């Protein structure tokens, strides 16, 4: 007699094979590779920050050499030797910088000469009768006395009247140890100026030697790619694209900063702000830092107008002029010229500025956009970096 057939059993699904309602993307790299990539990235960032004093002048020299190399090539077409052309360009930069400094030296000296008066004004504003600093110091003293004597107050002395506390005059506060010492600012500024002059000398020497070498390093990089002709062509195309993008970007900086400086000089002169030429030079230099330079410029001109006129209306006019001119130049001229150079994502550029500013400070804000342009050009030509190129693209 045949046995009855057994009922069919449905195998239970393992947790790994359990059906899901949604789709899942596979992890592109294994966990070990991801961990090694994170460690390598952290080490690389630390190395960039540690070698900042070396990398910043190197990057500035390379960018300036990319910018001025067409001028040396143009001189060569007129039968001027490269050594003489490089020397001529370097001397022109030094003489132009010296002439500009000499032109506005008097106004900068006037600003420095007014620093004691500005210090006294700020001291009166902060430590005068009912000033913010005086109220903060009084509150801190009351809290300190209350916490120090809370456990040792005699019962009979609870209702005793406390003698009034004598507040030091503003001059004493300015000379005391609890105030901000101007001599510390002067010393820190002197050290910063010495470091800046040292880095400027390094950049000038590096620029001269790079202009003198010409296309030597370019040929070496093409030779190091290997015997493959296709790799050499790709490397040469990458270098040419970087050269074109950097030259166009530096030309855009020159045009926009000169235009902004001229407009700021006209606006500040119309307002009546003293030393308008010096402030115009400062405006052109600060505008090298996208976004952040405009805010610093508006704050500086507003504070200078407030201290000079002692009224709020001229200060607001100076701040409004700085913001309006920077917005006009940045929106019309910079946007149009940047679109012709390389279509960049504005959000990605802003994030890159935050990153380089965190990494290298002010120099990172100055070099952030050229560096991200170079990264975008390389990512568009190298296999495996398409994701980065897509994120940076418009």
Image: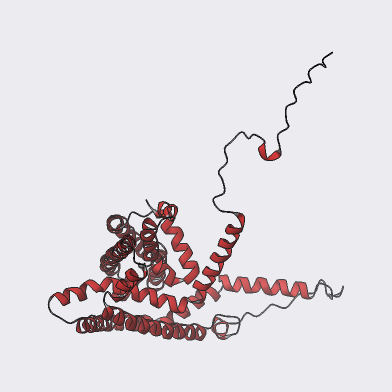
* Nearest to the observer: residue 114 or residue 326: 326
The image quadrant where one finds the N terminus is top right
What residue is drawn where x is 15% and y is 81%?
A: 80
Please, which residue is most extreme toward the right here? 155
What residue is drawn where x is 28% and y is 55%?
A: 332
Q: In this view of the protein, can residue 21 be seen by the observer?
A: yes
* Nearest to the observer: residue 318 or residue 57: 57
What residue is drawn where x is 30% and y is 68%?
A: 268
Q: Residue 230 at what x, y percent from top left? A: 32, 60
Please, which residue is most extreme toward the left here? 78
What residue is drawn where x is 82% and y is 72%?
A: 158
Please, which residue is most extreme toward the front here? 1
* Residue 128 picture quarter: bottom right
220 relative to 292, above or below = below
> What kind of colouring is applied to the model shown?
secondary structure
Tell me if 201 is positioned left or right of 182 in this view. Answer: left
Q: Residue 119 at what x, y percent from top left? A: 47, 80
* Residue 220 picture quarter: bottom left
Total tally of numbered discs in the picture:
0
Tell me if 124 is positioned left or right of 313 in this view. Answer: right
* Residue 227 picture quarter: bottom left
Q: Residue 324 at what x, y percent from top left? A: 33, 59
* Nearest to the observer: residue 274 or residue 328: 328
* Nearest to the observer: residue 381 or residue 107: 381
Q: In this view of the protein, can residue 128 be seen by the observer?
A: no
Q: Residue 153 at what x, y percent from top left? A: 83, 75
Tell me if 160 is positioned left or right of 279 in this view. Answer: right
25 relative to 350, above or below = above
């Amino acid at each position: 007699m045949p046995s009855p057939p057994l009922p069919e059993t449905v195998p239970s699904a393992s947790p790994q094979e359990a059906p899901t309602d949604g789709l899942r993307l596979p992890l592109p790299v294994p966990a070990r590779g991801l961990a090694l990539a994170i460690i390598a990235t952290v080490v690389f960032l630390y190395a960039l920050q540690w070698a900042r004093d070396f990398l910043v002048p190197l990057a500035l020299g390379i960018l300036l050499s990319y910018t001025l190399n067409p001028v040396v090539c143009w001189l060569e077409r007129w039968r001027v030797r490269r050594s003489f052309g490089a020397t001529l360009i370097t001397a022109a930069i030094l003489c132009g910088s010296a002439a500009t400094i000499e032109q506005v030296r008097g106004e900068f000296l006037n600003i420095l000469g007014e620093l004691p008066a500005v210090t006294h004004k700020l001291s009166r504003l902060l430590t005068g009768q009912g000033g913010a600093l005086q109220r903060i110091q009084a509150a801190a003293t009351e809290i300190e006395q209350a916490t120090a004597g809370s456990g040792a107050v005699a019962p009979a002395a609870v209702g005793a009247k406390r003698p009034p506390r004598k507040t030091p005059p503003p001059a004493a506060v300015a000379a005391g140890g609890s105030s901000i010492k101007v001599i510390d600012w002067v010393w820190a500024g002197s050290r910063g100026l010495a470091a800046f002059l040292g880095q400027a000398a390094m950049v000038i020497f590096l620029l001269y030697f790079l202009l003198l070498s010409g296309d030597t390093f370019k040929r070496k990089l093409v030779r190091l790619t290997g015997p493959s002709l296709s790799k050499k062509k790709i490397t040469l195309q990458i270098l040419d694209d970087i050269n074109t993008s950097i030259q166009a970007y530096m030309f855009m900086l020159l045009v926009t900063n000169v235009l902004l400086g001229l407009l700021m000089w006209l606006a500040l002169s119309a307002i009546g702000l003293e030393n308008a030429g010096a402030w115009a030079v400062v405006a052109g230099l600060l505008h090298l830092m996208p976004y952040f330079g405009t805010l610093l410029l508006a704050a500086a001109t507003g504070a200078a107008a407030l201290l000079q006129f002692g009224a709020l209306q001229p200060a607001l006019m100076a701040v409004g002029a700085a913001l309006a001119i920077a917005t006009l130049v940045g929106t019309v001229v910079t946007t149009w010229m940047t679109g012709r150079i390389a279509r960049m994502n504005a959000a990605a550029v802003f994030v890159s500025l935050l990153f380089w500013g965190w990494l290298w400070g002010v120099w990172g804000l100055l070099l952030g956009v050229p560096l991200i342009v170079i990264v975008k050009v390389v990512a568009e030509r190298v296999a495996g970096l398409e994701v980065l190129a897509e994120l940076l693209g418009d």
